């Protein structure tokens, strides 16, 4: 079957107001480049003509400015899930223009198959190639593309000639059966392959191909600074201590690492440590630092959902792809983040908090409890099932006007029951086997910034007792003070109780 070549504008014309649209990719990589801007342009024309035009948008995770940015600026999105990281989309979410459902990334694909979100009208997929019988060679990520492609009534494929044909063989496409027929997912070590190197779809669904030749436009990461380096060093110190104590096997365990500068600092520290043995990664995202660790021989293998490399590192990877062919596999998000596999493999999870409270609860999504930042992403998929779950954050931000260790988190994404270790630039709080009061004392002394420790100790003194000595009248005093004066350190608990 020969598929017709169409324009991005023709693809956009396939969509009408209220349609549900899927987009390939996971983070900024693997997302289509030209159709979403064409949808945004159509939305502007419709709005100028006085007609409503918004779509419901389903993705693998965050996208990039080609998708979330263009569509948000055109006010073209009614509903969005499961994750985003674009400032324009964030603004639309926080002002109520976009109805955003923040989800665990491993959940969306199966819930779409269960029918929880109705029908999917169309999916736009970036690919390196497609055969006449519907075998799609994906690019640098998989995300929820397999389920989106099977659920959608129509498929449009952007063939990105920037992706080399040599990427063939890196993917492992596997979709589990749905209950009550699901069996165990047979991944017993990170390098196991259980699916196919291509995505098979019904060729009758493919309504058009579009040729492109564009990189993902992923910039480099901010250089490591003193704070992130200290956090990274503290994570390494903790892991080395666990190795020495025999609580981590001498062979070590697979690692999961979140996205961003703190994650890069942690991985850099692992690479520098002579006591950390070679390790594998079972994670949702591989960043630039992992490629460096592979070249150093520190990281043996990486199982991921996306190669979230900067453009410069992606070009290096493409040029040296044969050297990494047997060391990387790219999976769907519901496999890379699957709780069953995470627990079976004994994955050590390392994620970032916006804030944590003195009892071990973590907020990773909402600024001052109300404003969505990005979303929970895959952190919960790993945290609740990890061999050891670690959360990291700076002790202070905004020049010391914000303490990231607070009496009570303003929004809870990960409860005390899931958070095993909290690490800041100040130190390490191992919360395993600690009561609420013991956790509070440990976090204040080891993780809070010295400038905020007296205030946090004063907060504990307000308590009238109880298993968790929380004082509700003052629990959000840090946040209230920041809202009034812009500086949490000016907190006066007496004003609130």
Image (cartoon, helix red, strand yellow):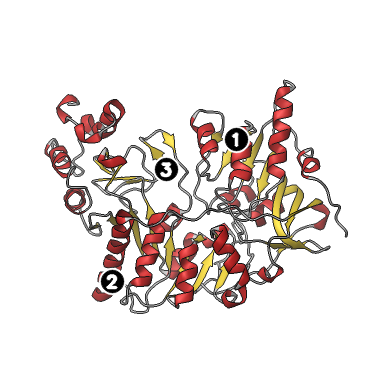
Between tags 1 and 3, which lies in front? 1
Residue at position x 62%, y 48% from top? 112
Q: Which of 227 and 148 is in front in this view?
A: 227
Answer with the quarter of the image where residue 497 lies: top left
Q: Is residue 305 above or below residue 36?
A: below
Q: Name the residue under label 2.
A: 240
Q: Nearer the viewer, residue 104 or 308?
A: 308
Describe the element under mark 3 as helix, strand or loop: loop
Answer with the quarter of the image where residue 370 lies: top left
**Distance in Å between CA atoms under marks 1 and 3:** 19 Å
Crowdedness of circle 3 by 10 Å Cα count: few (<14), some, many (20+)? Answer: many
Q: Where is residue 375 in the image (x, y as percent from the top left)?
A: 47, 44
Residue at position x 53%, y 45% from top? 83
Can residue 420 be seen here? The reply is no
Can residue 437 be seen here? The reply is yes
Q: Where is residue 15 in the image (x, y as percent from the top left)?
A: 75, 38
Q: Quick check: 399 left or right of 297?
A: left
Question: Nearer the N terminus, badge 1 or badge 2?
Answer: 1
**Distance in Å between CA atoms under marks 1 and 2:** 45 Å
Between tags 1 and 2, which lies in front? 1
Q: Mark 3 points at which residue?
A: 365
Describe the element under mark 2 as helix, strand or loop: helix
Residue at position x 40%, y 58% from top? 263
Crowdedness of circle 2 by 10 Å Cα count: few (<14), some, many (20+)? Answer: some
Determine whether label 1 and label 2 are within 8 Å by CB: no
Q: Which of 423 and 497 is in front in this view?
A: 423
Q: Mark 1 points at which residue?
A: 72
Numbered marks: total: 3
């Amino acid at each position: 079957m020969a598929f017709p070549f169409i324009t991005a504008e023709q693809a956009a014309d396939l969509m009408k107001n209220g349609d549900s649209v899927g987009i390939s990719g996971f983070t900024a990589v693997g997302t289509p480049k030209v159709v979403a801007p064409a949808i945004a342009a159509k939305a502007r024309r419709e709005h100028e003509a006085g007609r409503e035009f918004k779509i419901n948008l389903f993705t693998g995770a965050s996208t990039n400015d080609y998708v979330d940015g263009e569509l948000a600026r055109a006010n073209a999105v009614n509903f969005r899930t499961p994750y985003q990281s674009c400032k324009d989309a964030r603004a639309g979410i926080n002002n109520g223009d976009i109805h955003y459902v923040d989800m665990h990334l491993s959940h969306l694909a199966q819930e779409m198959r269960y029918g929880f979100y109705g029908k999917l009208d169309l999916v736009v997929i970036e690919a390196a190639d497609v055969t006449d019988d519907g075998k799609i060679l994906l690019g640098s990520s998989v995300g929820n593309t397999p389920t989106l492609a099977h659920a959608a009534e129509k498929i449009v494929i952007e063939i990105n000639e920037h992706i080399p044909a040599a990427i063939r063989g890196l993917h492992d496409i596997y979709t589990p059966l749905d209950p009550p027929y699901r069996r165990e997912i047979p991944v017993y070590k990170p390098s196991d392959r259980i699916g196919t190197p291509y995505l098979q779809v019904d060729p009758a669904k493919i309504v058009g191909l579009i040729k492109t030749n564009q990189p993902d436009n992923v910039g480099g990461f901010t250089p490591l600074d003193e704070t992130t380096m200290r956090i990274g060093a503290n994570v390494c110190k903790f892991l080395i201590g666990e190795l020495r104590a025999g609580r981590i096997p001498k062979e070590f365990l697979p690692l999961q690492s979140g996205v961003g500068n703190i994650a890069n600092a942690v991985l850099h520290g692992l690479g520098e440590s002579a006591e950390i043995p070679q390790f594998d990664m079972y994670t949702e995202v591989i960043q630039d630092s992992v490629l460096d660790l592979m070249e150093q021989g520190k990281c043996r293998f990486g199982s991921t959902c996306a190669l979230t490399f900067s453009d410069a590192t992606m070009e290096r990877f493409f040029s040296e792809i044969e050297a990494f062919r047997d060391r990387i596999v790219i999976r769907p998000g519901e496999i890379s983040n699957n709780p069953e596999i995470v627990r079976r493999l004994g994955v050590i999870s390392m994620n970032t908090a916006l804030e944590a409270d003195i009892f071990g609860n973590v907020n990773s999504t909402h600024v001052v409890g109300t404003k969505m930042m990005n979303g929970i992403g895959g952190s919960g998929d790993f945290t609740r099932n990890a061999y050891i779950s670690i959360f990291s954050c700076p002790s202070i931000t905004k020049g010391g006007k914000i303490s990231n260790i607070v009496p009570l988190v303003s929004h809870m994404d990960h409860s005390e029951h899931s958070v095993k270790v909290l690490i800041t630039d100040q130190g390490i709080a191992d919360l395993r086997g600690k009561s609420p009061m013991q956790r509070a004392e440990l976090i204040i002394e080891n993780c809070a910034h010295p400038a905020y420790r007296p205030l946090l100790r004063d907060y504990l003194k307000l308590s009238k007792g109880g298993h968790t000595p929380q004082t509700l009248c003052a629990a959000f005093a840090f946040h209230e003070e920041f809202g009034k004066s812009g500086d949490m350190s000016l907190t006066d608990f007496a004003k609130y109780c």
